[in-house]
Image (cartoon, helix red, strand yellow):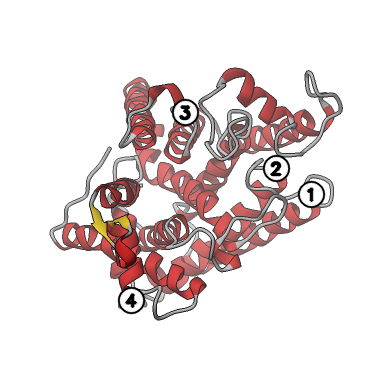
Amino acid sequence: MTQNMVQAAPARLLSLDVFRGITVAAMILVNNPGDWGHIYAPLQHAHWDGCTPTDLVFPFFLFMVGVSIVYALSNKKADPATHSKTIFRVLKRSLIIFGIGIFLALFPDFDFANLRIPGVLQRIAVVFFFSSIIFLKTSTRVQLFLMAFILLLYWALMTLVPVPGIGEPNLEPSTNLGAWLDNKLLPGHLWASSKIWDPEGILSTLPAIVTGLSGVLAGKWLRSPADAAHKTAGLLLYGNLSMLGGLIWNLAFPINKALWTSSYVLYTAGLAAIGLGICYWFIDVKEYKAWTKPFAAFGMNAITVYVIAGLLPSILNMIQLTGPGGTPMGLRRYINELLFIPYFNPENASLLAALLFVFICFIPIWIMYQRRIIIKV
């Protein structure tokens, strides 16, 4: 990424920025409904097994981290003398991203005793680091071997290894091996909604690295000497085969975002490759670009807008106003009560409030885009 944790490469793909921007906008939308009790089903995560459109957002982002690694580090890979310096820079950026994630988890109360250590940016940082090292130091054949090995190892650990203190292997929320490991190593520092397991937990980060490596393979293909038609066809073929593999594996190892199962990796990476292939064909090849600027703005400053979206709800809640009936409420809820709740059904009011939040986040990003400001980490 440019704002995606790596130095921008001269040969830049507009389609990558746009696809990333669409993904970031969707991430903000689904993370910020006006009312968590009233959300349309496609804008919610699957309750456990299964995959909704919302469950595609995070793996799509990690997939594009992998694509961007190739564009950022290919020249460095070709010169082994620079590898040590490059690895240091990758480590530095990973630590910065991880630190930003910790800061967002602490803000605004800075309650270190109950700090959630895993998180979205923390997982991005880990995936970026390991995917970058693997890209720099290994060939495509070794990368394919590692991907297969990690997915099979994770399947074996989750389905064949007994869970200490619990018994038989299982894939239930609080009693699977990943949940046991999270609770053993990070007690009191997990997702607040569960407290005993985390959807961005330790063990499930292993297959998440494969999601990043899937993007690395796609990035290498896009940088290959093949012509545009073959590149597009290759991405679509790769995507469909991966998606089919995920659906087949789903029969034995269910597609599950919270567990980041191996079938989920294949299924979502396949859909990401298809989405990127379509964007590449229409934007970079056919040059249908008139509609792309808002999404390119999001995509070029992806981490910045994610941070804005993470801080803004807390800041708005600090501004206390008196709502209908004299009820004290934060500014964000006040806006919802004023503009949406009286005039729309609960689901539409919640959706419109989320769309307004996306637009508010877009304003500073659009100004930055117009002024060619890209904040790199």
Within 10 Å of disc 3 (Cα), the crowding (few <14, some 14-19, many 20+) is many
Residue 40, horizontal then vertical, whole percent: 56, 68
Give the amino acid at mark 2.
Answer: Ser
Q: Which of marks 3 and 1 is nearer the N terminus?
A: 3
Front label number (3 vs 2): 3
Which quadrant holds residue 349?
bottom left
- Judging by the rendered image, the residue that carries numbered circle 4 is 291
How far apart are the two marked residues, 3 and 1, measured between alpha carbons?
31 Å
In the rendered image, which residue does mark 1 sit on?
Answer: 249
- Nearest the eye: 50 or 289: 50
Q: In which quarter of the image is residue 152?
A: top right
Q: Tell which circle, 3 or 2, labels the residue nearer the N-terminal end.
A: 3
Q: What element carries label 3?
A: loop
Q: Distance between the residues labelled 3 and 2?
A: 23 Å
Mark pair 4, 2: CA separation: 35 Å
Which of disc 4 and disc 1 is earlier in sequence?
Answer: 1
Residue extending furthest toward the right: 168
